[in-house]
Image (cartoon, rainbow, N blue to C red):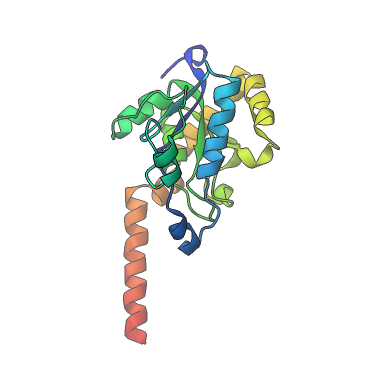
Amino acid sequence: KVPYKKKKLLCAINSNIAPPFPLVLLSPFKKILYPERSKAIKFFEKEIPKEFSLYGRGWNAPMKFSLKEKLFGHKTYPSYKGSIPRNLNSKLEVLSKYKFNLCFENCIADGYISEKIIDCFKAHTVPIYLGAPNIEKYIPKNCFIDFREFKDYPALLEFLNKMDEKTYKKYIENGKKLLKSKKFLDTWFEEGFLKTFLEAISYNTGHRRLN
């Protein structure tokens, strides 16, 4: 637990990688969010350089599938703090030092919800979420900040700066309650995944026999 007053404002934890363009064309998910992440990083680096930090692999080198960056050089990111060891505890330790996390998925698609938002709840950090349009079907709105509700990044930053400690802690408590919810645990964690997986196998096996 990191005291509220000792937390910096905002961080982003992502790898600097995007799929090559031909794969994007073939994918059913056309609305990728890699460009939006870059836009957000650029804005917060400029506006709150002392309160924003960037973590992840690949930010200090040309993007893997970018011929342009390999030929003409890559961008530099003053907010970059390095990569994080590939274990959950290290990621949670970093997240816990920030009030908010830019929690942008790789693409926009119904039901596509990764570990990013759940890791924020575990670390007692408030996620600023952009991704699955139906996120509220799975995670209550009082647990996260929905980026879609803001017209631009200046409006989001104003909202973050004006939030008082009491309101902030409400988000944290709501996230903690969610992690203790039996329904949520049964849906998202090991036992729930195993149940869903076995039901799918059972259904598909029975369906083939009928046909």
User: Residue 119's x, y, as percent?
Assistant: 41, 36
131 or 37, which is in the foreground? 37
- Number of marks in the rendered image: 0
Residue at 61%, 39% in the rendered image: 146
Dividing the image into 4 quarters, which one contains the N terminus?
top left
Residue at 48%, 52% in the rendered image: 112
Residue at 59%, 18% in the rendered image: 165
Quadrant of residue 76 in the image? top left
Q: Which residue extends farthest top?
A: 5
In the image: residue 93, left or right of residue 177: left
User: Residue 156's x, y, as percent?
Assistant: 65, 30
In the image: residue 195, left or right of residue 53: left
Q: Which residue extends farthest bottom?
A: 211
User: Residue 194's x, y, as percent?
Assistant: 31, 56
Q: Classify 208 as above or below 14.
A: below
Q: Which residue extends farthest front?
A: 71
23 or 166, which is in the foreground? 23
Q: Classify 26 as above or below 127.
A: below
In the image: residue 154, left or right of residue 109: right
The answer to whether residue 36 is visible is yes
User: Residue 103's x, y, as percent?
Assistant: 50, 37
45 or 108, which is in the foreground? 45
Dividing the image into 4 quarters, which one contains the C terminus?
bottom left
The answer to whether residue 180 is visible is no
Q: Classify 171 as above or below 147.
A: above
